[in-house]
Amino acid sequence: MKLKTKRLTTTGILIAISAVLFAFAIELPYDGELTIAGMVPIIIIGYKYGMKWGLLSGFVFSLIQIVLGATSSNAFAGMYDSANAARSVVNIILMAILDYFIAFTLLGLSGMYKNKIKNETKAFALGAFTVCVFRFLAHFLSGWILWGSYAEWFFTESMKGSFSQSILNHFSGQLLSIIYSLVYNGIYMVPETIITVIVCLALISVKPLKKYIVDENA
């Protein structure tokens, strides 16, 4: 009972820390936000307590992100078109699934290499990197499927320059939408992933923190 209470308390605190870090994210050029290791607390939960508990915690965190996204972001409102309400509702649901439920729930799989790779540092860092890739893929699919129609506007109005012009000269249609989603999501997810892995490596290199991260009873 004590251990269960401790696990619930620890999980709640770590989820709250992640929520705060995401709330104070840094806005980047061309949209997108960069957090200071906002995913790390959820990644710690998944590694410390296992993937089942990690997925549940990631799902809870995704609900928090949906609430924050719906109240502070224009994404949900921008997806709604009164002329085609039914399709808009479907798109909003799909966006919630890809950009929130899947993207953040899968962070809980960070313990996938625990007890499979003997070196705990490598297992933790590789798990962190892998779930960052999962999150990127979820956002990529959303960007391609739901926001691909904005690709030409993005490269002509938002991200102007020789690179954008070269993209427009060589790609069109679905391929342009794919390139758009790769570029748009890569702008913030690549540095986010690098920061996350570096912070994970730094944390687990400190002996007391390593015991805390690795031992579910610590």
Image (cartoon, grey):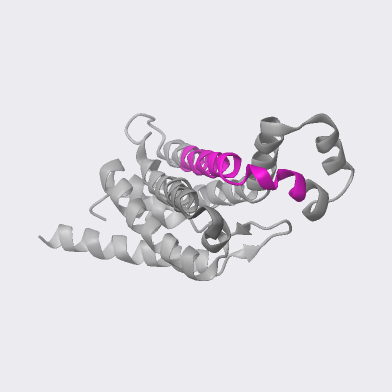
Magenta stretch containing residue 131, yes or no? yes
Magenta stretch containing residue 35, yes or no? no
Residue at 29% over, 62% down: 10
Q: Which of 182 and 196 is in front in this view?
A: 182
* Residue found at the far right of this picture: 162
Q: Where is residue 203 in the image (x, y as percent from the top left)?
A: 47, 53
Q: Is residue 32 visible?
A: yes
Q: Where is residue 209 in the image (x, y as percent from the top left)?
A: 40, 56
Residue at 57% over, 41% down: 140
Point out the image quarter for the C terminus. Answer: bottom left
Residue at 55% over, 42% down: 136
Q: Nearer the viewer, residue 112 or 31?
A: 31
Q: Which of 173 and 33 is in front in this view?
A: 173
| Above or below, comparing residue 95 to residue 113 in the picture | below
Q: Position of residue 1 (x, y in %)?
A: 10, 60
Number of residue marks: 0
Residue at 79% over, 51% down: 159
- Drawn side of residue 148 relative to residue 18, left or right: right
Q: Where is residue 212 in the image (x, y as percent from the top left)?
A: 34, 54
> What secondary structure is the stretch in magenta mostly built from?
helix
- Drawn side of residue 26 relative to residue 210, left or right: right
Residue 30: name its quadrant.
bottom right
Q: Is residue 36 visible?
A: no
| Above or below, comparing residue 51 to residue 37 in the picture | above
| Above or below, comparing residue 138 to residue 212 in the picture | above
* Residue found at the far left of this picture: 1
Q: Nearer the viewer, residue 67 or 191?
A: 67
Magenta span of residues = 128-154
- Drawn side of residue 152 relative to residue 215, left or right: right
